[in-house]
Amino acid sequence: MGTPIGATLISEDGIQPVVDVAAELACPTGLIELQYAYGPDLVPPPEALSEGMWRWRNLLPLEDGPILYPLPVGGTPLLALPGLRRLIGLPSLYLKTETRSPTGSNKDRATALVLEYALREGATTVTAASTGNVAVSLATGAAASGVRAVIFVPEDVGEGKLRMMRATGATVFRVRGGYKDAFKLSRACAAAYGWLDRNTGANPVTLEAKKTVALEIWDQLGREVPDVVVVPVGDGTTLSGIAKGFRELIACGVSDRGPRLLGVQAEGCQPLKRIWAGEEPVPAAGTIADGINVSYPINGVTAVRDVRDSGGAFIAVSDDAIRAAIS
């Protein structure tokens, strides 16, 4: 059982201590980072990843008991692809393939942990705002779990993803004003109606789930830390979750360093890259990479901090470069 013993609230004003947040599942002013009584006993021994994400439950805020969430999640492969290594001249490159998750996205990890709470606590409705991937993940996971999903998306959400959400029976609202307004409306409805809030950047459980990517990478590399981890960045929570995972390995005494973090944004939507570089903000033009098309990153302050602390960097790539990389 992973039992949080404290937390740190990350807000626009910096880092502020929080005294008693072990039971907190949402924070309106920033992310809560749960902390544990760290030690090597929290880290499972090397073995096959058959349990997926739940193998790391000693470092997750879960009470004892069977896992109720019905879909497999986590334990995704780390691939060494010789052809790609030769093509781009990186002989030690690995790809963490989250496409093996139920909806083909690392969003399924956070969805699984939030819905595990819903199933244990008897919550009947879960909500989130999304540009697409979180929405599809929550809609699918909620349908499998027998929980109602109410999802708020920008009005220009892709029709393909909209059809996938609706096919699961989720209630979907298209919101004028973009992701920022969809996020505010989802959080307001969660507070007003008592729905479980799955919003990334608000519910600290989402950060806890995302850190398992780092734990798996370390395990799959023979319990070694890579030199650099490259992460696509929208809200910034995936990057911060990975950073937290590597920090916790150090805190547990099983690692002595973390990797440099390289955050990747699209040229048409690069607010965090510009903040990191000390440049003036500019209106976002948008990008074909809708999963990172976030003009107002909810977790932006923390993500920039994590990149700087790691000695890493942000970069921005064009849509043409994205198309070329796909092919």
Image: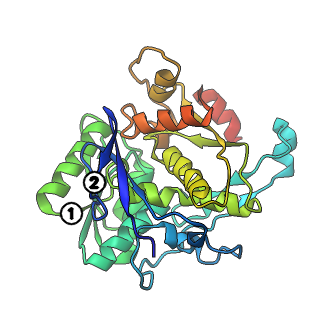
* Percent of width and height locating residue 201: 36, 47
**What is the secondary structure assignment of the residue under circle 2?**
loop
Q: Closest to the observer: 140 or 110?
A: 110
Query: Which colour scheme appears in the figure?
Result: rainbow
Residue 215 visible, this angle: yes
Marked residue nearer the N-terminal end (1 or 2): 2
Q: Residue furthest left?
A: 192
Q: Position of residue 313 (x, y in %)?
A: 60, 29
Q: Quadrant of residue 40?
A: bottom right
Instruction: Identify whether 177 is placed above or below 97.
Output: above
Task: Check disc 2 and give the amino acid type.
Answer: Val
Image quadrant where residue 56 sits: bottom right
For the residues marked 1 and 2, what is the alpha-carbon distance in whole angstroms? 25 Å
The residue at which mark 2 appears reads as 19
Task: Identify the residue position indicated by label 1 in the image.
Answer: 195
Task: Tell me if mark 1 has few (under 14), some (14-19) or many (20+) residues whose alpha carbon lies within 10 angstroms of its own.
Answer: many
- In the rendered image, the vertical position of residue 176 relative to residue 253, given as above or below: above
Viewport quadrant of the N terminus: bottom left
Q: Position of residue 146 (x, y in %)?
A: 32, 77
Q: Residue sitting at 85 percent across and 36 percent down?
A: 89
Q: Residue at x 67, y 41 (%)?
A: 326
Asked if residue 115 lies left or right of residue 43, the reply is left
* Residue type, numbered disc 1: Trp
Q: Which mark is residue 157?
A: none
Q: Is residue 98 visible?
A: no
Residue drawn at the location 72% of the way across and 59% of the way down? 78
Camera-near label (1 vs 2) is 2
Q: Residue at x 69, y 63 (%)?
A: 219
Bin the neighbour count of mark 2 within 10 Å (Cα to Cα): few under 14, some 14-19, many 20 and up.
few
The C terminus lies in quadrant? top right
